[in-house]
Image (cartoon, rainbow, N blue to C red):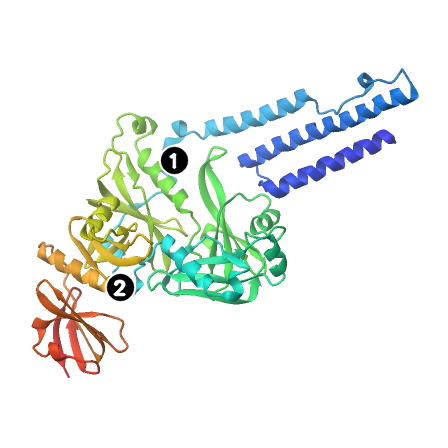
């Protein structure tokens, strides 16, 4: 009975320690996960160590009994150790290591180059037809760093929250009600603040409009109960693991649905090559961040409001595999005929209410120009390739910075836009404090053509005018006219002519009116009613009503 009790207690200790290890490591119970085999090795070593510790305590007791009772027949050597011996422990760990090694060899690129090449596939697209022009008020003008600064400033304005909560630096880019938006939740400041607030949950999340820079702190009627800053079963990673013990999760992003309800989007991994290789996405679990309710969706079933299922890192890796192994593994090492790669950077575009990843494609033997670019839908992985030789992104950034070198502004990584049916880079120009000061458009094919301005509209007009001066043929420009009451007036000298900057009531456009359009412009005042005729690049006529 004494031996049985000792064995039972030892088993309970082992199980308790293993549970704690599972609690913190959270491995998927899945034979295709290397984390699972690592966990088995940890459990094996744990059982061995606890057994040895138990042996030491038993041996110490045996020695004490020998000394006290003077029973010479008892000795340390007569005590039987735990059945999981050192040899068995080493063998199990070695077998696990060999299994993982063999699995990785089976999926090695040298044997599966053609499979890696087809992890992502795409067809050539027509840029002008498939990427339509967007309004100037929908162009994302701030990058993630600026969005983070705006979010911190907004939280700092909320005196009731700033002392208890911090911002979770996620900032997922989504399309929300037709607007490019970054969204991120708050998090508990520390353990004490978690204890004080966990009953109500996290009361709000932050949205940053990437085009207008409007930043909002959205308060919730019911707080977020499941988050990354929770410590126990309401921790989102732990909740997902216990609800879906066999799923292998990729990145977990934060999004909101069309009603503003916060969700965690946990993409699930499938391996397309061998045991552990060819990492891809097969579906996603959507968890309501307030209630904890969750549901698994296959890739084709994921709701359309979800924007980021495939991580940018995974898409870029698969694009690089496609470019590297299209002519086999050996060619990727020797000769490198036709080998291409993604450029060092990416950004996002909003197309048809989906978020698409943009990156340039360049030859591995050149780092000064692109041979084309790709767009990948981050929900479906649909990918289009646009063969278009032009400037590499960092060359375009340098060209834009050269236009304002006297100001020392730095360009953000560009996004690709259709401007007058010309593929064009757009970027913001930031000062040393990280604040957006100006904007720039750079022609992809002739990156020395740069238009800059203090507003997006000004920089676009400057860009179109410079395209014309360089004899670049633009699409037929559509003429429009707007009538309204003058709200604000400013003036400046541009290219030797006085120009008036005018806004009209109920319209957010800034019209640049050269004095040559009308002799009455110097007498224009607030409250006058005018009609402005304009096209994509300039104002062509102004009438006084």
Q: How many marks?
A: 2
* Quadrant that contains the C terminus: bottom left
In this rendering, position of residue 385 left or right of residue 305 = left
Question: Can residue 19 be seen at all in this image of the molecule?
Answer: yes
Task: Place residue 5 in its image quadrant.
Answer: top right
Write the residue at 79% across / 35% down: 9
The residue wearing badge 2 is 136
Write the residue at 26% across / 78% down: 505
Task: Give percent across and percent down for residue 297.
Answer: 51, 53
Write the residue at 24% across / 33% down: 365
Q: Is residue 23 above or below residue 137?
A: above
Mark 1 residue element: helix
* Quadrant that contains the N terminus: top right
Q: In this view, does 239 lie above or below 523?
A: above
Q: Which of marks 1 and 2 is nearer the N terminus?
A: 1
Task: Give percent across and percent down for residue 265.
Answer: 49, 53
Along the line of sight, the residue nearer the viewer: 23 or 144: 144
Q: Is residue 141 above or below residue 83?
A: below
Of the two numbered discs 1 and 2 in the rendering, the one whose residue sits closer to the viewer: 2
Task: Place residue 69 in its image quadrant.
Answer: top right
Task: Give percent across and percent down for residue 279.
Answer: 45, 39
Q: How far apart are marks 1 and 2 (CA)?
A: 40 Å
Question: Is disc 2 surrounded by few (<14), some (14 to 19) or many (20+) residues within 10 Å?
Answer: some
Question: Can residue 257 be seen at all in this image of the molecule?
Answer: no
Question: Is disc 1 surrounded by few (<14), some (14 to 19) or many (20+) residues within 10 Å?
Answer: many
Instruction: Find residue 116 and name its label.
Output: 1
Task: Place residue 151 in its image quadrant.
Answer: bottom left
CB atoms of marks 1 and 2 within 8 Å:
no
Write the residue at 46% across / 27% down: 105
């Amino acid at each position: 009975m004494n031996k049985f009790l000792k064995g039972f207690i030892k088993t309970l200790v082992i199980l308790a320690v293993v549970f704690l290890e599972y609690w913190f490591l959270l491995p998927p119970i899945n034979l295709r996960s290397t984390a699972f085999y690592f966990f088995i090795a940890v459990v094996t070593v744990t059982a061995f160590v606890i057994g040895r510790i138990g042996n030491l305590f038993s041996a110490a007791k045996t020695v004490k009994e020998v000394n006290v009772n003077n029973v010479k027949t008892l000795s340390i050597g007569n005590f039987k150790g735990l059945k999981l011996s050192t040899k068995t422990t080493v063998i199990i760990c070695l077998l696990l290591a060999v299994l993982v090694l063999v699995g990785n060899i089976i999926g090695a690129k040298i044997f599966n180059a053609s499979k890696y090449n087809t992890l992502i596939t795409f067809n050539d697209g027509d840029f002008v037809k498939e990427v339509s022009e967007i309004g100037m008020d929908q162009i994302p003008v701030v990058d993630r760093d600026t969005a983070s600064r705006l979010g911190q400033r907004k939280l700092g304005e909320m005196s009731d929250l700033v002392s208890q909560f911090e911002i979770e630096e996620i900032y997922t880019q989504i399309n929300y009600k037709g607007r490019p938006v970054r969204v991120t939740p708050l998090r508990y400041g520390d353990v004490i603040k978690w204890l004080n607030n966990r009953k109500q949950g996290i009361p709000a999340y932050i949205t940053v409009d990437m085009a207008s820079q409007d930043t909002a702190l959205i308060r919730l009627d019911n707080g977020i109960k499941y988050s990354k800053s929770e410590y126990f079963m309401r921790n989102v990673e732990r909740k997902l693991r216990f609800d879906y013990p066999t799923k292998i999760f990729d990145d977990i992003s934060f999004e909101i649905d069309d009603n503003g309800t916060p969700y965690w989007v946990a993409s699930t991994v499938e391996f397309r090559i061998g045991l552990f290789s060819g990492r891809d996405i097969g579906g996603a679990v959507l968890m309501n961040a307030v209630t904890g309710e969750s549901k698994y969706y296959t890739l084709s079933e994921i709701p359309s409001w979800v924007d980021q299922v495939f991580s940018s890192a995974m898409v870029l890796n698969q694009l690089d595999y496609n470019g590297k192994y299209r002519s086999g593994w050996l060619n990727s090492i020797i000769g490198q005929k036709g080998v291409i790669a993604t450029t060092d950077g990416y950004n996002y575009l909003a197309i048809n209410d989906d978020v698409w990843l943009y990156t340039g494609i360049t030859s591995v033997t050149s780092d000064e120009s692109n041979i084309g670019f790709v767009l990948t839908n981050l929900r479906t992985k649909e990918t289009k390739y646009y063969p278009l030789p032009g400037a590499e992104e960092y060359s375009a950034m340098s060209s834009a910075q050269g236009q304002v070198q006297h100001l020392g502004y730095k360009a953000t990584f560009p996004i690709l836009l259709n401007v007058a049916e010309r593929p064009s880079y757009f970027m913001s120009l930031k000062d040393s404090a990280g604040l957006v000061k100006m904007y720039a458009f750079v022609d992809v094919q002739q990156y020395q053509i740069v238009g800059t301005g203090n507003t997006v509209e000004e920089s676009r007009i400057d860009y179109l005018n410079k395209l014309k001066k360089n004899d670049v043929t633009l699409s037929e420009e559509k003429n429009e006219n707007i009538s309204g009451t003058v709200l604000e007036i400013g003036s400046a000298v541009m290219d030797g002519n006085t120009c008036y900057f005018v806004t009209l009531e109920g319209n957010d456009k800034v019209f640049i009116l050269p004095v040559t359009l009308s002799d009455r412009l110097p007498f224009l005042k607030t409250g006058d009613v005018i009609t402005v005729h304009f096209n994509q690049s300039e104002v062509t006529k102004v009438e006084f009503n």
